[in-house]
């Protein structure tokens, strides 16, 4: 299996622009997580899905952030409009729902820089 | 609120020596899992070790072991015979049910 695949690896954009981050979970995994990593806050859970349905989005910082999972093999995290404080590394992770002893498998992350 | 605290932003250890990374968590749950992840400069998150809360025996994986104190809500990671390849950011994670909550991480430097 190729693991969790995120794209792009790096994104540089200007303030005010729309940014879309993409994630393909591991086949067969039905839980998907989006995290944001910063030096100050570490890994923050933004949102997670079970069977393509958003379960908890309380970590989404504000209305500028939105996430979708139209099918079991694809998810997006969108920031519109982007701001410099959104600069961070964004990770997607997947797991088999209900198999609580298993770890979450992470993608390589997207480093977002908003200038 | 369910939170994970790693009180050591940075640690260093001499090669071949032992180092312990601290982690505490806050929960009202009785059944959950705990994990330690390693993040090298490549950014890849790699599972190091896991612990089931209902097991009293501390988990061990080669040079890595944990000291799990359920009553104290403490979950420290001990790295024995430290190697240069152990240099990385280490994250403690708490998982009740399907969610994962991470600490802010500890940056480990291994001194040759």
Image (cartoon, grey):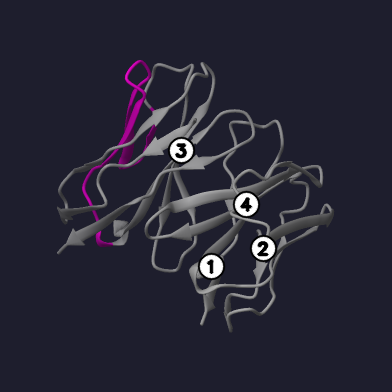
Asked if the residue under mark 1 is in contact with the one under mark 4, i.e. CB atoms within 8 Å, the reply is no
Q: Which residues are magenta?
A: B59-84
Q: Name the residue that disc number 1 marks.
A: A86
Q: Say which label, 4 or 1, has the lower sequence index.
A: 4
Q: Nearer the viewer, mark 4 or mark 2?
A: 2
Say yes or no: labels 4 and 1 on the same chain: yes
Q: Name the residue that disc number 2 marks.
A: A64
Q: Say which label, 1 or 2, has the lower sequence index.
A: 2
- Bin the neighbour count of mark 1 within 10 Å (Cα to Cα): few under 14, some 14-19, many 20 and up: some
Q: Nearer the viewer, mark 2 or mark 3?
A: 2
Q: Residue at x 58, y 84 (%)?
A: A14
- Bin the neighbour count of mark 4 within 10 Å (Cα to Cα): few under 14, some 14-19, many 20 and up: some
Q: Quadrant of residue B7?
A: top left
Q: Nearer the viewer, residue A67 or B11?
A: A67
Where is residue B30? Give x, y as percent: 51, 16
Q: Nearer the viewer, residue B53 or B24?
A: B24
Side of A4 where B60 appears, left or right: left
Where is residue A96? Give x, y as percent: 70, 40
- Measured in 3D between alpha carbons, the distance from the residue under mark 4 to the one under mark 2, in whole angstroms, is 9 Å
Asked if the residue under mark 2 is in contact with the one under mark 4, i.e. CB atoms within 8 Å, the reply is no
Q: Callout 1: residue from which chain?
A: A
Q: Name the residue that disc number 3 marks.
A: B35
Asked if the residue under mark 2 is in contact with the one under mark 1, i.e. CB atoms within 8 Å, the reply is yes
Q: Callout 4: residue from which chain?
A: A
Mark 4: secondary structure: loop
Q: Name the residue that disc number 4 marks.
A: A60
Side of B31 where B9 appears, left or right: left
- Measured in 3D between alpha carbons, the distance from the residue under mark 4 to the one under mark 1, in whole angstroms, is 12 Å
Q: Nearer the viewer, residue A42 or B16?
A: A42
- Bin the neighbour count of mark 3 within 10 Å (Cα to Cα): few under 14, some 14-19, many 20 and up: many
Mark 3: secondary structure: strand
């Amino acid at each position: 299996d190729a693991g969790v695949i995120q794209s792009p690896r790096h994104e540089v954009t200007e303030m005010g622009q729309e940014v879309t981050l993409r994630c393909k979970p591991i086949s067969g995994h039905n839980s998907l997580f989006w995290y944001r990593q910063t030096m100050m806050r570490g890994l923050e859970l933004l949102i997670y899905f079970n069977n393509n349905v958003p379960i908890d989005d309380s970590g989404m910082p504000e209305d500028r952030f939105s996430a979708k999972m139209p099918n079991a093999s694809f998810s997006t995290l969108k920031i519109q409009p982007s701001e410099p404080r959104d600069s961070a590394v964004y990770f997607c992770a997947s797991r088999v729902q209900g198999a609580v002893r298993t770890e979450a498998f992470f993608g390589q992350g997207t480093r977002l820089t908003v200038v | 609120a369910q939170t994970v605290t790693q009180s050591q932003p940075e640690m260093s250890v001499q090669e071949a020596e032992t180092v312990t990374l601290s982690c505490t968590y806050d929960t009202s749950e009785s059944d959950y899992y705990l994990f330690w992840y390693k993040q090298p400069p490549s950014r890849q998150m790699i599972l190091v070790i896991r612990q089931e809360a209902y097991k009293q025996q501390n988990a061990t994986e080669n040079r890595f072991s944990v000291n799990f104190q359920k009553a104290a809500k403490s979950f420290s990671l001990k790295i024995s015979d430290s190697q240069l390849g152990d240099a990385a950011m280490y994250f403690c994670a708490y998982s009740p049910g399907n969610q994962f909550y991470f600490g802010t991480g500890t940056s480990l430097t291994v001194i040759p």
